[in-house]
Image (cartoon, grey):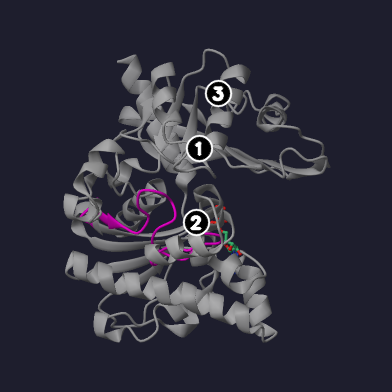
Amino acid sequence: MNILVLNCGSSSVKLQLIETKTGSAQGPERVLARGSVERVGSAEATLWFELAGKPAHRSQQEIPDHKEAISRLTSFLEGAPGEADGTSRIDGVGHRMVHGGQFTHSVRITDEVEREIEKARDLAPLHIPHNLKGYHAARALFPGIPQAAVFDTAFHHSLPRRARFYALPYEWHDRYQLRRVGYHGISHRYLALRYAELHGARPEDFKLITVHLGSGCSMCAVNRGTSVDTSLGFSPVEGLVMGTRPGDVDTAALLHIMQWEDMSAEQMLDTLHRRSGLLGLSGASNDMRDLEERMRRGDPRAQLAVEVFCYRVKKYLGAYFGVLNGADAVIFSGGIGENSPAVRALACEALDSLGIRLDAEKNHAAVGAEADISAEGASTRVWVIPTREELLIARETAEVIMGDAD
Ligand code: ADP
């Protein structure tokens, strides 16, 4: 079954066409094509597209909206000499949805499902509106083709109540569905499954701490395949320091600042989502590559931002060792986790009491590739595993479609 996987952000569309093998023919997925558009809505959007084994196409053009971006990207499939290998056929569309409200698993998108997803719009304002734009565009472009939503929150439905509740007035939990839902679940789940696969074992055989460090960052304590705690909470602002979000802060300090600066709640939310984190502290950039470059040039604010970022990861590593009562492995992933040996080294510094010791050479060499980077004899293994959220989305979408057909 060929599944088109869509991941739509505010100004970007990422797309993959993945051949899945389900049922008795279950096996490794094959990526038939991939592409992206950055700066959607601008006159100089950049489009990139690649059919497996063929040279990539890159161009700059005006792309006014998400629908046009998806339409231009999928038009490459039609022109491809793909009939023989099925590249031009789409059997289903899988959408990454950052917040899934009460959904505990992937579902086919109906009007009712869409209304439920809509309810989460205010909680994930950087993501949900754009995820839904992708769905509307795909529905118009591929009428009649089943579409599924795969939620980042679903994996964390297993959180026990001690990890889910805030120590706030109890009635708010009922009135506002206030609870820690967690995010990045597709990535954390993929990492746990992949770690088991790499070891020829089952996820139930391991206690893992997965560390996803991208634009958004989160960690997850995975107890034998199940999420038991995660660092993002009710909104995608809690926990680790992120590109533009602060992670954990003293909430009372925020209220004081709102008074002192005469700020509205809306302005404060905007600051927490868009002007904090690495960007807020460094005053320069939300991009780790830029900050590493600035550090090399001796920029003290970039140094501070990276130090705070790494220290927060280290603190959560300690916390999750406690939550799990020990862990077999720590897995780094996401754009920063996969590519920055410096961040991994700083986050794992002086944690030998937890059995964590990196091999400096292996850490340095592991850039964008699967690798065990722990020192020989270290009792807790540390791995780098590039996340492949699209594979999991394709697999789940195929299963939803097959389930509906039964
Ligand atoms: P998104 O959450 O938007 O998918 P990514 O997972 O691509 O984001 O992560 C983006 C982050 O990864 C940025 O901070 C970027 O600077 C960082 N990054 C990418 N490559 C490197 C690298 N080689 N070294 C350090 N950081 C990197």
Q: Does the magenta segment cover residue 51?
A: no
Secondary structure of residue under mark 2? loop
- Tell us which disc is closer to us: 2 or 3: 2
Mark 2 or 1, nearer chain start = 1
Mark 3 or 1, nearer chain start = 3
Kindly indicate whether the residue at mark 1 contacts the one at mark 2 (C-beta within 8 angstroms): no
**Few, some or many C-alpha atoms within 10 Å of disc 1 (few <14, some 14-19, many ≥20)?**
many
Could you say which is closer to the camera, residue 32 or residue 258?
258
Residue 90: mark in rendering: 3
Q: Position of residue 147 (x, y in %)?
A: 47, 23
Amino acid tagged 1 = Ile
Query: Where, by quadrant of the figure, is residue 120 drawn?
Result: top left
Amino acid tagged 3 = Ile
**Few, some or many C-alpha atoms within 10 Å of disc 2 (few <14, some 14-19, many ≥20)?**
many
Quadrant (top left, top right, bottom left, bottom right) of the C terminus: top left
CA distance separating discs 2 and 1: 14 Å
**Few, some or many C-alpha atoms within 10 Å of disc 3 (few <14, some 14-19, many ≥20)?**
some
Relative to residue 19, is residue 398 drawn left or right? left
Tell me what residue is drawn at x 31 percent, y 44 percent.
155
Residue 280: mark in rendering: none
Q: Which residue is mark 1?
A: 128
- Chain part drawn in magenta: 223-250
Could you say which is closer to the camera, residue 188 or residue 236?
236
Q: Main structural element of the magenta stretch: helix, strand or loop? A: loop
Q: Is residue 89 visible?
A: no
Tell me what residue is drawn at x 62 percent, y 84 percent.
300
Q: Which residue is mark 2?
A: 216
Quadrant hosting ligand 1: bottom right
